[in-house]
Amino acid sequence: MGKYVYFFGNGAADGTGAMKDLLGGKGAGLAEMTNAGIPVPPGFTITTEACKVYYENRERLPQKIKWDIDEALKRLEGILGLKLGDPKSPLLLSVRSGAKFSMPGMMDTILNLGLNDETVEGLAKKTGNKRFAYDSYRRFIQMFGNVVLGIGKDVFEKLLEAKKKKCHAKYDTDLSWEDLKELVTEYKKEIKKVAGVNFPQDTHIQLSMARDAVFKSWNNPRAVTYRKLNDIPVDLGTAVNIQAMVFGNLGKTSATGVGFTRNPATGKKEFYGEFLINAQGEDVVAGIRTPQPITHLEKVMPEVYKQLKEITGRLEKHYRDVQDFEFTVQDKQLFMLQTRNGKRTGLAAVRIAVDMVEEGLITKEEAILRVEPSSLDQLLHPIFDPKQRLKVKVAAKGLAASPGAATGKIVFTADDAVEWAKKGEKVILVRSETVPDDIHGMNVAKGVLTATGGMTSHAAVVGRQMGKPSVVGCSGLNVNEKEKYVIIDGKKLKEGNYISIDGSTGEVILAQLPTIPSEIIQVVSGKLKESKSEVYKIFQKLLSWAEEVKRLKVRANADIPRDAKIAFAFGAQGIGLCRTEHMFFAEERLPVVVKMILSAGKGQEGLDEIESLKKRIAESSAEQARELKEELKKAEKTYGESVKDYTESLKKLMPMQKNDFYGLFKEMRGYPVTIRTLDPPLHEFLPKREELMVEVATLKASNSKKSSAKIAKLEELLAKVEELHEFNPMLGHRGCRLGITYPEITKMQAQAIFEAACELVAKKKMKVIPEIMIPLVGHVEELRVQKRIVVAAAEEVMKKYKVKIDYFVGTMIELPRGAITADAIAREAEFFSFGTNDLTQTTFGFSRDDAGKFLKIYQKLGILEKDPFATLDVKGVGELVKTGLHKGRSTRENLKVGICGEHGGDPASINFFHKIGLDYVSCSPYRVPIARLAAAHAALSERVKVAEGD
Amino acid sequence: MGKYVYFFGNGAADGTGAMKDLLGGKGAGLAEMTNAGIPVPPGFTITTEACKVYYENRERLPQKIKWDIDEALKRLEGILGLKLGDPKSPLLLSVRSGAKFSMPGMMDTILNLGLNDETVEGLAKKTGNKRFAYDSYRRFIQMFGNVVLGIGKDVFEKLLEAKKKKCHAKYDTDLSWEDLKELVTEYKKEIKKVAGVNFPQDTHIQLSMARDAVFKSWNNPRAVTYRKLNDIPVDLGTAVNIQAMVFGNLGKTSATGVGFTRNPATGKKEFYGEFLINAQGEDVVAGIRTPQPITHLEKVMPEVYKQLKEITGRLEKHYRDVQDFEFTVQDKQLFMLQTRNGKRTGLAAVRIAVDMVEEGLITKEEAILRVEPSSLDQLLHPIFDPKQRLKVKVAAKGLAASPGAATGKIVFTADDAVEWAKKGEKVILVRSETVPDDIHGMNVAKGVLTATGGMTSHAAVVGRQMGKPSVVGCSGLNVNEKEKYVIIDGKKLKEGNYISIDGSTGEVILAQLPTIPSEIIQVVSGKLKESKSEVYKIFQKLLSWAEEVKRLKVRANADIPRDAKIAFAFGAQGIGLCRTEHMFFAEERLPVVVKMILSAGKGQEGLDEIESLKKRIAESSAEQARELKEELKKAEKTYGESVKDYTESLKKLMPMQKNDFYGLFKEMRGYPVTIRTLDPPLHEFLPKREELMVEVATLKASNSKKSSAKIAKLEELLAKVEELHEFNPMLGHRGCRLGITYPEITKMQAQAIFEAACELVAKKKMKVIPEIMIPLVGHVEELRVQKRIVVAAAEEVMKKYKVKIDYFVGTMIELPRGAITADAIAREAEFFSFGTNDLTQTTFGFSRDDAGKFLKIYQKLGILEKDPFATLDVKGVGELVKTGLHKGRSTRENLKVGICGEHGGDPASINFFHKIGLDYVSCSPYRVPIARLAAAHAALSERVKVAEGD
């Protein structure tokens, strides 16, 4: 027979950290720490092999193993000078299960094993704390009764409650040691009654029963199910860890505390933590006594402090990461109870990673992997002053849509936001939902709060795009925009009242809270010098390392030069999506756009009709021509005005758009700029149908003569709006369908793009790479007809400027049919960009504006684990992305393929995009650093897999 | 050198019908007919080999071939006793190209070759018709000038127009022979001027030039392009067919006519046609003289008549199909000018196919293939009396959405339709669009006419479902439903005015037109005895043959027993889709449904909350329980009323639904019945949001005190409607999402299904196969949670009735994600039914309610060939269907898979569904025969392919 019991203690262990199979994860860890000279409470591990033998031997342990255990126990008693069951110096033990993989359902922990009616008195004497001793005894009996004897927790809870009631105690802590002693008696009686056995006073029997209970827990139904679900082999078995309990409450020479090897909030290299003299671990957390800063330990116990600093420093080196540790000093002897990698803020994560590289502790690659990409967000957005934050109550909670803290006065409309902002007020825009023509208001607001909508609702997307703190879908809100008030948490707030929102947590606070701005944003937007910001320096350093390893390019979605500038500063390698229509909402443009829309239908029809007639006239005999000329006159009369409105408004829009594109190209300094032609349904630019209907009805009912002209005008507008009204606008007349029905719009946009590009090349000798992207293509023919228009415009403008530009015409793949027929589409498309927002909508059949209602329930029921609009649904939508990519490249080998949906800024999704072989991701400017880091993570995780031969 | 010229005439030909390669299609056909003893005008074919030699020989024909041609010409002259260029008895010729494949772009025909200034006089004398002779000459010069000499048609047209103007002639026929003679002179001058050569008076030169022109036309740019596009080898070459002209206008012993070997309208075996004595072919069609029925020919020319009957009978046998023929009698001699398979109505097609099988002419399989499945439709729907139809004008044209003729008085609302129908009026429901709560009106109307919507709009789908003639998307309509008038073609029609619509053509007529009802429908619906309808008998016979060969099963989409009965009579092998919600709109049910909907949200929440509290109470300690009981009281108070409304209305609906299902099961006599759980968004059952808004606004503005209570009530309703309002209902809270958020509804429906099934089994000992179908599943978990509810209800009800029923729980695959993850879904689903309507919507991103606007333009531009909602888009949607099918069967080998979208009744789509291996298609009851026939076609076309080794 081999070795079944592995001892650890006094600076040496039988096992090593590599023996996870045999000792389980926990046992291997204890052996590793002991070998590293870390003073952990000594003990021993009964191996997983013993567990197997236990089962093979009809659930009995062979005598040989029992003897080994006795021997280990004796060694343990020797080291500590204590003895299991000794009434004067009782050794107390913890018993824990520990398999190779941690597994819910298996027995967790029994503490204080070794207490009985006698030893409890010994403990009381030793600690000078009767209440502590009897409370420990009560807890042990409870755990033992529940875990080893299988008695329901409620049985003990009932007795405890009854006791508290009897003693008029509100909390457990109100019970005296006498009460607890009585309770111990009652517990024991109840055990006898329920389980039919006496609670064992023999401490060795306690130990062997606990040991067997651990073995048995391996075959708990919950553990069995868990193994099945996670493909864990049934024959691994569990180890049992038996370890001495240590006490920090044995007088002035004892203590207990917690700490970090570096500041987890800032990342600075400073010893950080708290401790209490003569206390148990719980006391530090419970907040009954105020702990002292760990630096004070140096004064009280200089030796221990020195040892602790040395040990934790070693631990940090050993684990090569910040340690979050717990320790206990038992009569001047230091024991490390736990150490683990410490949680930290984003800022701390970056600083620690960079520092550790410079300290030679970790490699650059490790530094990259140490920082969660999404945590970079915390470095970019203003945050509430944490001290102020604790003083106020959270009134409601919504979805944390766009991170950052914001505080200001409530306004209810975009126009009000602009007006108040002009007066220098900081405002929060509070609305039921936002729509595209709220953009000017969102732009000036400090934050946005909406009652409806999900993580990809308009408010959320634009919020993130703008880097604007936003809380959306906050169902606790009752917004009345008309009468300008909102009810939150039962309180009615009016326009001008203060409110604060935290877009990182979704919290809403009914007060003015001061914020701390982000240094990095200040640097990027040119308000702070690079050299003045240390945070910026480490941030850039980490990203430069990420740049070295990542394969995916990262671009930004940006519509205006200001956003492009920020994107460039954040390291974007191009613009992946410029939404041309976002510029249409500008105050001076909207009237022109509206005029264009109102005339587009008849205008385009007229243009086509007139052109066709002119062509026929040119080809006809004189007589035929005469007739056709009559027809032409008629057509010009019928369509003339619409054609004029249509072409004139397009002519006005052209230089405006040209100017937009000029700025974008300039800011991107030769990187490619992808410009999408007009996409949203045209009715988005017009007043809302139902509002017009109500206005007309109200005017009519009020029966005033004055209003008849107004009614007529409104009805005319309403008729047009009705014409454009759709039942499902998301599946309606939008995307390339607009450019196909109104080719003049595509032509105008293409002209504007090439005018801008040529001018920049001709005048400034700058490099420009325009990529014209046709949206919502499901059929190659759609792309073909649009591409023809773009190419014609390009040739014409380039000829005019005498300039040659490398440009590309491509498409968004955002419909299932686009992905499925990507091989055909790639015959025309020079690049693909996956629009995963729309693709998610159509693949699932979820409207992102409406799905919030049932998606909540879906997540509650576990039907969907994640919001598919936030993290790409790999099995469904991802499958289509893969199909589209492979089919596209099957036709055009070097097809450039990217993605510009919301998922372009989501680290999990970026990992997927890297894996399948996309060329780039594009996301909002403020997510560019996150995407860069995530792309580096993806590349590194691939390396690891290759190294592992996966 | 081989043989380059093949003669045909006098009952014998050098070639045969099989020599298409050598003689071209036309030449081989002429040889075949001649050999079969059919008197075709004699002539000869210059082979495709000669064409090759012509090109090899630098576009010259070797002398040997020219000699062969001269010889053949002499033989021709000998047979007819005429001579090319003979002024007295001129032989006139036609010259035609004829390659192996017919090819646009190649020279078509030159007629009357052989006319010159002398022979034209000979022709005039012979026919006694100077005008005819000169008109023939003029036409010949024109054709020759254009085709052989390459002069633009407009050149001659201009001269003709000038001549007409000069002579004050309105039509060509107003010109005298003198005018035409002058025109001939002018034509010749113009040819000299434009082409620089004289028009050849030498008839042999005419012939050789025409012959070479045919050869040259092989390499016309249009012909070259066509060959490239259609993969026709360039080296095939064309043959030249030179054939004698014959004249039916040489006096009383000459005639010309057209005919059919059987009646093309009814299919009856009767000689059918018309003729004119002393006339040219054109005259029969031109309508200047009234032709006589062909039977009169027996009196006038008994010999010819006998010969014609014998020949056409022989032709029918030879081609084994009805022949549509043209003939000319030239001086007692009969010539067949053309014969081809005759076009026929659906009724005729069926009768002819069945008769021909019984005559031993064709096989059953051929009979099946002779009938276009979609033409069966014509047998099922009433039609307008064709004679009456010709007398009226078509005022507007829409989409032919649901075939059949209907006439009646105009009504503008569903309620009006019901009211008028009760008074015994026949009404046509005219609306901008129809919505689900118009169903009761559509049900009583004779036909439906809408201004908007496409082939799968609500009106169209329900129209076909009901077999109700419908014209939709008729943009010429201007409907004002409120003031109850419609403007069509400039005329204002009010309620009660007559209108007629033809759902087979989309035509709208502003009059009352009598209709002829369909016998088959009368039989199927039990109004006429089977034995009384001969049409029904042949119809059934054909379908029984189809049944023998088809592999696909055909089911029907039917919601109510009456439809199920018809479906069964039409041979449906089950119900593939019962839409449970269609029954919710019944007058007595709607209020219950509305109550259920208004209480569902809070009701379900309350039920869940109360149930969860009760559970916790049962598991809690006494003290905890006391607190929880307080909470329970509160919950009962908060939710009590909603829970009551919700559960009580569901309780009321249960027996109603049970009754529906009972009827369906009974009618289907043991065939499977697929019942879909609730699918449409709930707001469809409530008043429209914007209408409520307008009503409230109007009431508020009118400022009457009386209305304040009404306003409050309306606002309450509006609030609920607002809550249910969605931006894109098609992608919103519908399908299984309803059953998941309101599980009580699914439970009620499942109970109703199993109560009905069990009762039928228990009481009537009938076999019942319920298939419960969960709609709009995109994720297996959705199905899992719904299936659990269905199975629980099934077990409970079966236990209650002590009955065991074979039932299946499956799903619709109607979302891309459903198809993509079908392998996972098939773990739960016991059957799949593809919902290709929704699948088309999401795959293309087209809302079928909105796509009409741009789909028209798409079809005009050739972006899409067919409406994807009518015929399945094989490359996109079809690919997903295939993926879903294969993935589904990869998990569950014997998975039953069908399709229940609109495409289930479309023959082209059925062919695809057969090919990929679905088990069944399901379509509206009235399309079941079409689908059965189409399924047989699909099976037969596969056989052909297998035989061809494809």
Image: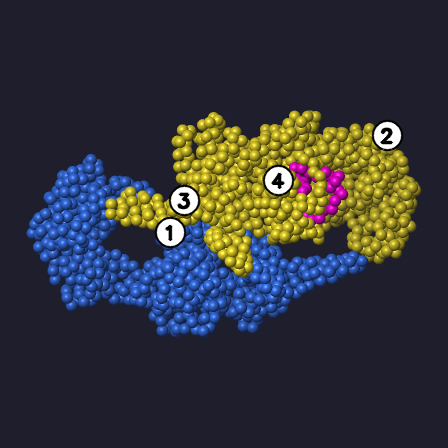
Chain colours: A yellow, B blue
| Element type at mark 4 | helix
- Reading the image, the residue beneath label 1 is B946
In this rendering, the label closer to the viewer, 1 or 2: 2
**The disc labelled 1 sits on which kind of residue?**
Val
Question: Label 3: chain?
Answer: A
| Quadrant assignment, res A152 | bottom right
Closer to the camera in the image, B305 or A77: B305
Closer to the camera in the image, A102 or B864: B864
Q: Earlier in the sequence, mark 4 or mark 2?
A: 2
Residue A574 in sight here: yes
- Reading the image, the residue beneath label 4 is A422
- Reading the image, the residue beneath label 2 is A299
Judge whether A687 appears above or below A831 on screen: below
Give how far apart the Cα atoms at labels 2 and 3 are: 88 Å
Question: Label 4: chain?
Answer: A
**The disc labelled 3 sits on which kind of residue?**
Lys
Q: Which quadrant, please, contains the N terminus of chain A?
A: top right
Label drawn at residue A656:
none
Q: Which quadrant, please, contains the C terminus of chain A?
A: top right
In this rendering, the label closer to the viewer, 4 or 2: 4
How many neighbours does mark 1 have within 10 angstroms: few (below 14), some (14-19), or many (20 or more)? Answer: few
Magenta region, residue range: A381-408
